[in-house]
Image: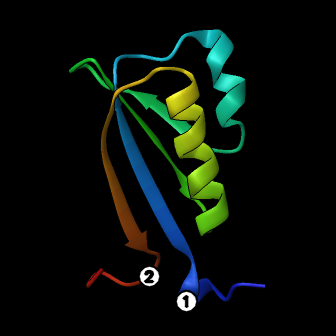
């Protein structure tokens, strides 16, 4: 089990807004459409789960803009 110190949060930004029917593909994550036409998908993920999210983005034909990694509780990463 991960300690709170080792929790990693990822924010994945894609082009466009997700259709309501696609939201179930990202269950357990925060899906936030932005006014600029992009969507940010974020949550606590290990490497396997991150690759799963990236595979879903590919399968849906979405354009990947960026992936940001944040270590919870550490402002230096």
Does residue 61 lie above or below 74 as drawn? above
Q: Which quadrant of the structure image shows residue 46?
A: bottom right
Q: CA distance from mark 2 to mark 1?
A: 6 Å
* Residue at the spot 42% in from the left edge and 23% down from the top edge: 62
* Mark number, residue 76: none
Residue 57 horizontal/vertical position (percent): 51, 32
Does residue 57 lie above or below 8 as drawn? above
Q: Which quadrant of the structure image shows residue 26?
A: top right
* Render colour scheme: rainbow
Name the residue beneath numbered marker 2.
73
Taking depth in this image into account, of 44 and 49 the one nearest to the observer is 49
Q: Which type of secondary structure does the marked residue at label 2 adopt?
A: loop
Name the residue beneath numbered marker 1.
5
* Residue at the spot 41% in from the left edge and 16% down from the top edge: 17
Estimate how packed mark 1 is, as few (under 14), some (14 to 19) or many (20 or more) residues with alpha carbons within 10 Å: few
Residue 5 horizontal/vertical position (percent): 55, 89
Mark 2–mark 1 contact, CB under 8 Å? yes
Estimate how packed mark 2 is, as few (under 14), some (14 to 19) or many (20 or more) residues with alpha carbons within 10 Å: few
- In the rendered view, does 72 fall on the left or right side of 63? right
Q: Quadrant of the N terminus?
A: bottom right
Q: Which type of secondary structure does the marked residue at label 1 adopt?
A: helix
């Amino acid at each position: 089990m991960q300690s709170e110190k080792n929790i990693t949060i990822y924010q994945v930004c894609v082009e466009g807004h997700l259709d309501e029917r696609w939201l179930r593909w990202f269950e357990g994550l925060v899906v936030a459409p932005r006014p600029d036409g992009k969507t940010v998908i974020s949550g606590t993920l290990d490497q396997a789960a991150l690759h799963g999210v990236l595979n879903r983005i590919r399968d849906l034909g979405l354009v990947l803009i960026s992936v940001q990694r944040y270590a919870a509780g550490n402002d230096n990463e």
